[in-house]
Amino acid sequence: KPDLVILSLVLNDIGGDFHMPNLIYRTLGPFKTVDYSPDDLNFLGKISYFLFRHSLFYQYLYPRVQNLWEYKGITPISFEGNYTKSTLFFYRNGFFQSPKYTQAFAKTEKDLLKIKDLSQKYNFKFIIIIFPTEIQLKDPGLRKPQEKLVTFCQSNFLWCLDLADRLAQEKQKKLFNDEIGHPNEYASEVIAQTIYEYLVKNNIIDQ
């Protein structure tokens, strides 16, 4: 019987197993044509997985040897800096090039509306908090997914807080523990204060 539910939404939540920067690709990312775990891999796959996690050279080599390991249908990884080209395309355009993820936004929106229905049924308030990645703070032109989410929330009368503008104000501070965008201690304080101010401003809680 909650009074308030706050959902932290990050961009890889939209695409299911759509992966973002390089760090994820050093784990199980390249093998996730389905929901694999390392235990699901065969002997050669486990060797490849180990090498991928521990060797930058093998990350470069991997697309050229993937057919050897018989993992069909895996898109070769192409990077711009620390980010994949597909990730940056998603940031710039707000949709996925791959047919596998064509309906990703629609599915996310459907799931959010299900939670809204629950909030009305059980009488709790539902707020969505959208987290940015580091590169989006430096280039507002890469925030198309957030724009789509905010527009969706406004159209469906959902409370929604996009943290990108607020965190972008902290230009002189280190905000993330890694390339993926996990906030460090300082950023967490800023985020907590920003959420609190949003809740008060919208009369969701008392000051």
Image: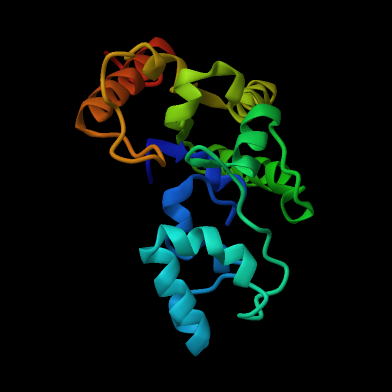
Quarter-of-image position of residue 17? bottom right
Kindly identify the residue that appears in the image at 42 percent across and 29 percent down: 134
Q: Is residue 162 visible?
A: no
Kindly identify the residue that appears in the image at 37 percent across and 11 percent down: 169
Kindly identify the residue that appears in the image at 49 percent across and 45 percent down: 21
User: Left or right: where does residue 69 sit relative to residue 43?
Assistant: right
Say which of 120 and 99 sits in front.
Answer: 99
Q: Quadrant of the C terminus?
A: top left
Say which of 137 and 8 sits in front.
Answer: 137
User: Left or right: where does residue 96 sit relative to residue 4?
Assistant: right
Residue 3 location in percent, x, y?
Answer: 37, 36
Quarter-of-image position of residue 69? bottom right
Say which of 55 and 132 sits in front.
Answer: 55
Q: How is the image coloured?
A: rainbow
Residue 4 location in percent, x, y?
Answer: 39, 35
Q: Is residue 130 visible?
A: yes
User: Is 70 above or below relative to 169?
Assistant: below
**Hey, which residue is sitting farthest bottom in the picture?**
43
Residue 57 location in percent, x, y?
Answer: 45, 60
User: Is 151 above or below relative to 66?
Assistant: above
Quarter-of-image position of residue 84? top right
User: Left or right: where does residue 40 sit relative to residue 69?
Assistant: left
Instruction: Give the total number of marks visible in the rendering.
Output: 0
Kindly identify the residue that appears in the image at 72 percent across and 43 percent down: 96
Residue 95 location in percent, x, y?
Answer: 72, 37
